[in-house]
Image (cartoon, grey):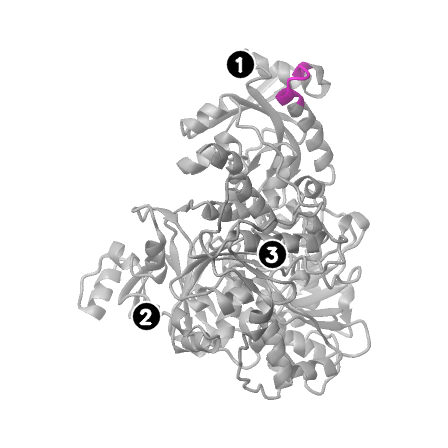
Amino acid sequence: MIQLFETGAYLINGTELIADNAEASAAVQAKTGKAVDKAEAAKQTIAYNILQKHNTSGNMEKLKIKFDKLTSHDITFVGIIQTARASGLTKFPVPYVLTNCHNSLCAVGGTINEDDHMFGLTCAKKYGGIYVPPHQAVIHQFAREMLAGGGKMILGSDSHTRYGALGTMAMGEGGPELVKQLLNQTYDIPMPEVVAVYLEGEPVKGVGPQDVALAIIGAVFQNGYVKNKVMEFVGPGVASLSADFRIGIDVMTTETTCLSSIWKTDSTIQEFYDIHGRKEEYAKLNPGEVTYYDGCIKVDLSKIKPMIAMPFHPSNTYTIDELNANLTDILDDCEKKALVSLDGAVDFQLKDKIRNGKLYVEQGIIAGCAGGGFENICAAADILENASIGADEFTLSVYPASMPIYMELVKNGCAAKLMQTGAVLKTAFCGPCFGAGDTPANNAFSIRHSTRNFPNREGSKLQSGQIASVALMDARSIAATAANKGYLTPATDFDGTFQHYQYFFDKKIYENRVFDSKGVADETVEIQLGPNIKDWPAMVPLTENLLLKVVSEIHDPVTTTDELIPSGETSSYRSNPLGLAEFTLSRKDPNYVRLAKEIQAVEKAREEKTCPVQKFPEIEEAWAAMKQITPDADRYNTGIGSTIFAVKPGDGSAREQAASCQKVLGGWANIANEYATKRYRSNLINWGMLPFLIKEGELPFKNLDYIYIPNIRKAVEEKAEIICAYVVSVGKNTAFEMTLGDLTDEERQIILKGCLINYNRVS
């Protein structure tokens, strides 16, 4: 089904793979009649050529990228624009789209969410942007319909910013990276490796894009095969897939932890642009005659079966047939894994979902950027035609990804087919994906064609004793399960006919409702600031030395951004840095906020020079031990703050708040064995936090210990490879070493100056 090459690979004429081994050069020459140069062949990838066109450094090893367009949603754009305004923003230098698909339910939090929307509308007018009102489109569907272009690059403040199927290299990053673009700065990365995803064959009836995506994620996530790399989709199998099918695979590449994705393009994608009235945006993209890839994922589409990703990660994959055949064993294994993910906080059960030897689920959701596409919903309607979802616990909600899709479903009758079954059609909204809509009942099991199934992401609260869980599936198998009234069923069991529905895009909806400045800024517009929209608090530069208290110690194999700062009910506070910070680690470590604030009070006193540090008894012993190491350290040159340890933090969302909430509570650093994504590490750096690394298995400190790092400012300035630190307590100074990993010169300056805002204010 899926084969991972142990070496790189050559692709000849876009069709034939040759593994990189001792005979590879001769084999390539025999096929082409030309001698092979691996370095030159590596420049023939689609990814390399797009990156080269957008690189401003003149050095393809150290890229400085400027993007063509930017996009954000209403959980992220307020903080981004507030940061840019504080740094001198006067106009959006490139098209910037502000969508409103996350905080759409304005009843949540009183007027807070709608205040954010009005902030976005007035900023779009003042700075020359585009504003998409709530319920019109989810961020990524609008981008596909109205922004993507062949050979272009788009940066978005949402992790699932992926438009590779349309020939657009897109990346999801934390807000500060968009701030840099708004200030005419660059996105700085080393040249990423490029991995071929070689598709052959074609999917069997009943298999959808989520099935292919989950199969790939299951094969590559744990081993990090594509981490921070570009996935380039090639091979003869691409031609067998519709545009919607390719899009459905592409959006899920985020869950592999890759940097970005790109696909070869053809007449199918050309037709997509024609349908959307933007035929000029199509570009034919293919790899070169001889192209070298740093790795290869070979996928036989004909062997992919309906898949399910069990709680609590998209990589926890099985075929549905495998799950049904081994129900008790697999559910028991999931329960045991949950003991780690949930820290034993609740009694989590799955085996009680077995009824008469079958798995019963209480909820089905088809939604958002992954599931809400036209073809997914039409296929679900065909499966459910003349069926009933029943009058028991099971419910089914369907969220078309945009109003143009919704209108076409109404016109072609698919909406009626679904509603007649008892399913509910709702407007474009990302809520079910991050816990702000369709939260299941306690202990309920939800199957969803959406992007993630992390612990508590669907909206349950461990602190209240409430737990539910999500499995990811394709819309087709969700519909087959719904037709079977909640009993898990693969769509390959469907013996009916999938009709071919022609899609007609009507842009009048957007013309009537979307504000488009056409890039013209109106400086006379006054920005509308609701009472919940707050400026970022002042942040001090990095001091000569640091004294850090460990205030949380997390030993899960991976810590998600949802665990660092919960989604769902916290969304209404995303425009209020201090208000949101109260929720930091609330679902993982409820003591974090209190402990961080206690040590932050010491730092505030130090900054204000109102009280000698020695008068705070909680750090007096650590201070005394620290003075033995560097007697010249004092309250003027030694910053005091908090840090956390996590094995591998930052999997998942691009949300910068996972880092900024720690920062506004006095966090100076994270210590980790590895950072799960570039996005999270970049967020730490942009908020002036040190991304320390410590070797796996070496943990000389524990929670509530104090760590002293002398001469840290000098170490950052001089690019020290090793950072010397000490665990300090009464009569004890235990030395250990950390590193900071690779940092660009700009990243070092951001850390030294305290955060990106400070960096831009003084440079």
The kind of residue tagged 1 is Thr
- Secondary structure mostly seen in magenta is helix
In the rendered structure, the answer to whether residue 93 lies left or right of residue 376 reads left
Distance (Cα) linking label 2 and label 3: 45 Å
Residue under the image location 35 percent in, 62 percent down:
46
Q: Which residues are magenta?
A: 605-614
Residue identified by numbered label 1 = 630
Question: Seen in the image, is 280 located left or right of residue 157?
Answer: left
700 over 647 or under it: above or below: above
Can residue 678 be seen? no
Neighbour tally class for label 2: few under 14, some 14-19, many 20 plus, Cα within 10 Å: some
| Residue 614 % position (x, y) | 67, 14
Give the residue pinned by disc 2.
14
Residue 609 highlighted magenta (yes or no)? yes
Q: Residue furthest front?
A: 524
State yes or no: residue 296 in magenta: no
Left or right of 695 on screen, residue 75: right
The crowding category of the residue bearing disc 1, from other C-alpha atoms within 10 Å (few below 14, some 14 to 19, many at least 20), is few
- Give me the disc on residue 121: 3
User: What residue sits 58% from the left and 65% below the top?
Assistant: 514
